[in-house]
Image (cartoon, rainbow, N blue to C red):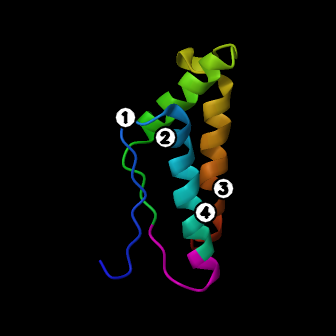
């Protein structure tokens, strides 16, 4: 655990904090990867993150899309995974 960073959130945290925690973890991962270190970033429950995005979208009165989720979460999920393409072997 000497070289471990844990970004945690719980379901009782504010919606904005739950949404931001995933981006915070990804930013930290990208930073250390750019320093040449080996990085493993794990998201325990992306469904809770998607739920937080849905709650934010409902508060902003966005219209729902697929499966009663606003279109935003799907695009944001793709944005979250986009940096991973640089790590995959060809």
Q: Is residue 39 magenta?
A: yes
Crowding around mark 2 (Cα neighbors within 10 Å: few <14, some 14 to 19, many 20+) is many
Residue 44's spot in the image, x, y percent? 36, 49
Q: Which residue is mark 4?
A: 27
Q: Is residue 49 left or right of residue 63?
A: left
Q: Which residue is mark 1?
A: 11
- Whether the residues at callouts 1 and 2 have beta carbons within 8 Å, the answer is yes
* Magenta stretch bounds: 32-40
- Whether the residues at callouts 3 and 1 have beta carbons within 8 Å, the answer is no
Q: Quadrant of the N terminus?
A: bottom left
- Whether the residues at callouts 3 and 4 have beta carbons within 8 Å, the answer is no
75 w.r.t. 37: above or below: above
68 w.r.t. 33: above or below: above
Indicate which disc residue 18 carries.
2
The answer to which of marks 4 and 1 sits earlier in the sequence is: 1
* Residue beneath the point at 57% across and 31% down: 53
67 w.r.t. 53: above or below: above
Frontmost of labels 3 and 4 is: 4
The answer to which of marks 1 and 2 sits earlier in the sequence is: 1
60 w.r.t. 5: above or below: above
């Amino acid at each position: 655990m000497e070289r471990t960073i844990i970004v945690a959130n719980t379901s009782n945290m504010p919606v904005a904090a739950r949404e931001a925690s995933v981006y915070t973890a990804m930013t930290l991962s990208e930073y250390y990867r750019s320093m040449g270190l080996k990085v493993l970033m794990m998201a325990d429950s992306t469904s809770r993150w998607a739920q937080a995005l849905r709650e934010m979208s409902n508060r902003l009165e966005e219209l729902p899309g697929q499966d009663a989720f606003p279109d935003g979460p799907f695009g944001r999920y793709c944005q979250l995974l986009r940096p991973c393409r640089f790590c995959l072997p060809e």
